[in-house]
Amino acid sequence: MPENLDLGGASAFAEQLLGLRGENLGLDASAVQRLSGVGLEVLVAAALQWRADGKALEIIGWSEAALQALETLGASPSELFDEV
């Protein structure tokens, strides 16, 4: 996953995800340093889409910055995403 999942980074990341739709997917969040509400929206939409498609979307290695941003936004990885 990109370092910045803010307004600019989330848009480009969403396009990349669309190209991977239909496949089981594992993402590494260890490099994420900035996660905004828009970035979280992209991740939640992807998680819901992958579930609807019957495919796995796993996000592993959450950076401390990403975990803090999720907490600030009222979310947690275990509530939203498949975990390894």
Image (tube, rainbow, N blue to C red):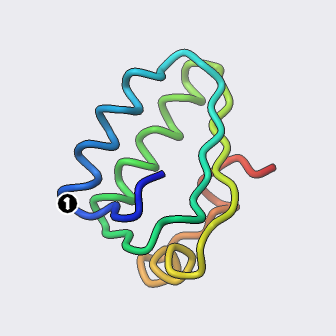
Task: Answer left or right for 56 relative to 40.
Answer: right
Query: Can you give x and y, in whole percent of width and height, for residue 83 in the image?
Result: 75, 51
**On screen, residue 28 above or below 3:** above
Check the image and name the residue furthest to the left.
8
Front-most of residues 14 and 79: 14
Q: Position of residue 76 (x, y in %)?
A: 60, 69
Q: What SS does tag 1 mark?
A: helix
Q: Where is residue 84 drawn, in percent x and y?
A: 81, 49
Q: Is residue 65 left or right of residue 12?
A: right
Please tell me how crowded label 1 is: few (under 14), some (14-19), or many (20+) other residues with Cα within 10 Å: few
Image position of 7 (left or right of 45):
left
Q: Residue tagged by mark 1?
A: 7
Establish if 41 lies above or below 55: below
Point out residue 79 in the picture as x, y percentages from the top left corner: 65, 60
Residue drawn 69% across the image and 62% down it: 61
Specify whether 25 is left or right of 75: right
Kind of residue at disc 1: Leu
Residue name at image x 18 percent, y 56 percent: 8
Query: Among all residues in the image, which is located at the extreme right?
Result: 84
Q: Is residue 17 above or below residue 39?
A: above
Q: How many marks?
A: 1
- Name which residue lies at 31% across and 69% down: 36
Q: Quadrant of residue 13?
A: top left
Residue at image position (46%, 38%) is: 46
